[in-house]
Every structure is written in C-alpha cells, then in structure tokens.
Image: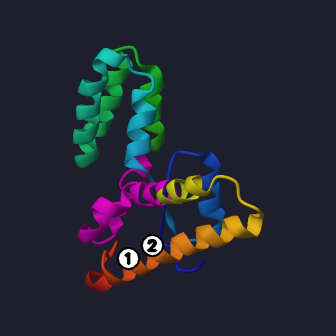
Amino acid sequence: MSGVKLVVSDGHKGIQKAVERSFLGALWQMCHVHFMRAVLRNVAKKYQKEIADKLKEALENETKMQDLSQELESRGYPKSADTVERFQFGLWNYRSFPRAHWKRIRTTNGLERINKELKRRSRVVGAFPSDESFMRLGVSILIDINEEWMTTKRYLSMDDD
C-alpha cells in the first residue's frame, strides 16, 4: 500500500507501532466506537448510559475530555479514566481531513461492515473444499463491494479534497 494517510483501529498497541514504522507520516486514529466500549467496560451498568452520553459530548468537544477523565477518576473508575488519558490524543486525527469525510473515518464501521458481509456469505457455504475456494469467494465478495462503492454507493467522495 502506498499513500496511506490515516489508519483507524482499536487501541491495539501493535497496530499503532506498525503504523508508526510502516506508514511514515500517516496518522493513527482510535475508532470512536472501540474507545467508548473500552471506557464503558469498567463502568457500572447503571451508569453506562450517563457516561456514554458524556463521552459522545466529549468526542465532539475536545476540552470536555479532560474533565470527563477527572470525573471518572473521582467516581471510582480509574481504569476508565486511564483509558481516556491514554487515547485522548488519538481521537481527533480524522479532523485533519475534509469535514465531509469525518463521519466515515472516525470509526472502523466501514471495515466492520465488510467483515460482517464476508462472514454472512461464507457461512452459507459451510465447509470449503480448499483454501483456494475460500479465497475465491472472499475475493469475489470484495470485488462486488468495491464495484458497488465505485459506481453507486460511493463511500468517500474525493472530489472535495
């Protein structure tokens, strides 16, 4: 791959290091969905909706993220506060790109959707006679998705760069 400008992923340290080493100059973006899950994982169920609402607000307004981290710490959720502290600087890299792209590039939802489609269509087959037959099906699915994006359902329009 060449010309990589942004890599969006969960908080896996290996991915972050690989981006740093392999894609010089590329930014790493923490997926907002994965970030929220990681923060909420350590919050009591009865407070998750409240904290999720505050997280959404903080993701729109960077200055509120530090306040939220302190609030989580004071409410007895140090692991959640630590998660906010660790990833807060990788949450807004998508803003370096055109505003029209922001909604699509702040999460891994596009990739998750592709994975879901690959699973759905390969599950129907069940057992594959060979690795090659599995690869042929996967590649044909990806080609179909690519053609759909190129012709009808453009994922990102590069015209407004």
Q: Is residue 23 visible?
A: no
The answer to whether 64 is drawn above or below residue 158 in the figure is above
**Residue at position x 35%, y 55% in the image:** 92
How crowded pointer 2 is (Cα within 10 Å; few <14, some 14-19, many 20+) is rated as some
Which is the main secondary structure of the residues drawn in magenta? helix
Asked if 28 appears above or below 54 in the picture, the reply is below
Q: In the rendered structure, which amino acid carries the disc numbered 1? A: Trp
Image quadrant of residue 94?
bottom left
The residue nearer to you, when weighing 50 against 111, is 111
**Taking 82 as reference, is 90 above or below it?**
below
> In the shown orientation, is residue 69 left or right of residue 143?
left
Region of the chain picked out in magenta, as a range: 88-116
Q: How many marks?
A: 2
Cβ atoms at labels 2 and 1 below 8 Å apart: yes
Residue highlighted by disc 1: 149
Q: Quadrant of the C terminus?
A: bottom left
